[in-house]
Image: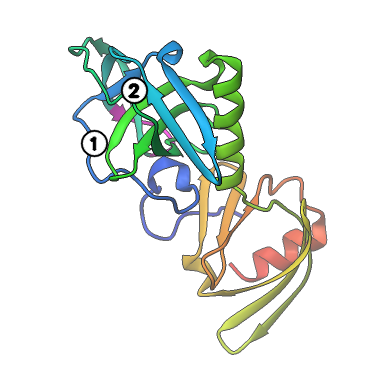
Amino acid sequence: MHFHDHGGAVKAADSGPSLPMPDATSSEMRMLDPAAVQFRREGARLQYRSAPGAIVGGTSPSRDVVGGMSPSRDTRDTPPTTPDTEWADATLVRLFPLSEPERWIALIAKDGKESGIVRDLAQLPPEPRRLAREELRGRYLVPQIQRILACRVRDEVVQWTVQTDRGRKKLLTKNLREQVKEPLPDRLTLLDVEGNRYDVPSLAALDPDSRRRLEAQL
């Protein structure tokens, strides 16, 4: 059985969780020098500052095979800028949450504008890298469905009992055919009535009963 996104198009950015995206982006991806970026935790907020000349280059965006924008091989230098060296609140957004969870991380300022992109978290110094990974783990907390234990249809709502990597959960879905995405082959993302996302990392890995219950609703 084939699963498709019933909208005719693959969603951008790997159909990842709903997160604040930049209000304004540059025509090119502005790459940040990993050595010039610092992060710190101020209470529950992540803050950053960068040294002058932190923008080291730009890339012309192109379409990625799984949707969204990805850097092309045509890299062009952009004039260095002098960003604010004071600590400022920041939001980190994965441009490709499923295919590249540790690369192409957009840094979004408090005003919603993109400050730049970290090409690879592995290139950051140890402490900024730890804080960035911690921030991303908290924002991209998507339970993974391991088994589908029960499925009941009530009017137009389907009630599910599932076993996830974070324990047993119950969820409600409506118009399931419109709320299932296939961001990658053999992988599904389900959206419940409250807007929460659940990930099925591998259809092939589901037990026969779980797969049968899922296919009966699609």
Q: Which mark is residue 98?
A: none
Taking depth in this image into account, of 80 and 104 the one nearest to the observer is: 80
On screen, 158 above or below 40? Answer: below
Q: Is residue 99 visible?
A: no
- Residue 22's x, y, as percent? 30, 43
Q: Quadrant of the N terminus?
A: bottom right
Question: Would you name the residue on which mark 1 appears?
Answer: 25
How many numbered discs, if any?
2
Which amino acid lies under the numbered mark 2 shown in the image of this protein? Answer: Pro
Task: Name the magenta segment's main secondary structure.
Answer: loop
Question: Percent from the top left, x then y, of residue 203?
Answer: 69, 49
| Mark 1 crowd level (few <14, some 14–19, many ≥20, 10 Å Cα) | some
Q: Position of residue 147 (x, y in %)?
A: 79, 58
Secondary structure beneath dot 1 equals loop
Label 2 to label 1: alpha-carbon separation: 14 Å
Q: Is residue 20 above or below residue 86?
A: below
Instruction: Point out residue 3 in the picture as x, y percentages from the top left corner.
Output: 55, 54
Quadrant location of the C terminus in the rendered image: bottom right
Q: Residue at x 44, y 15 (%)?
A: 34
Report the span colored magenta: 62-67
Mark 2 Cα within 10 Å, few/some/many (few <14, many 20+)?
some
Measured along the vertical axis of the image, is residue 116 above or below residue 95? above
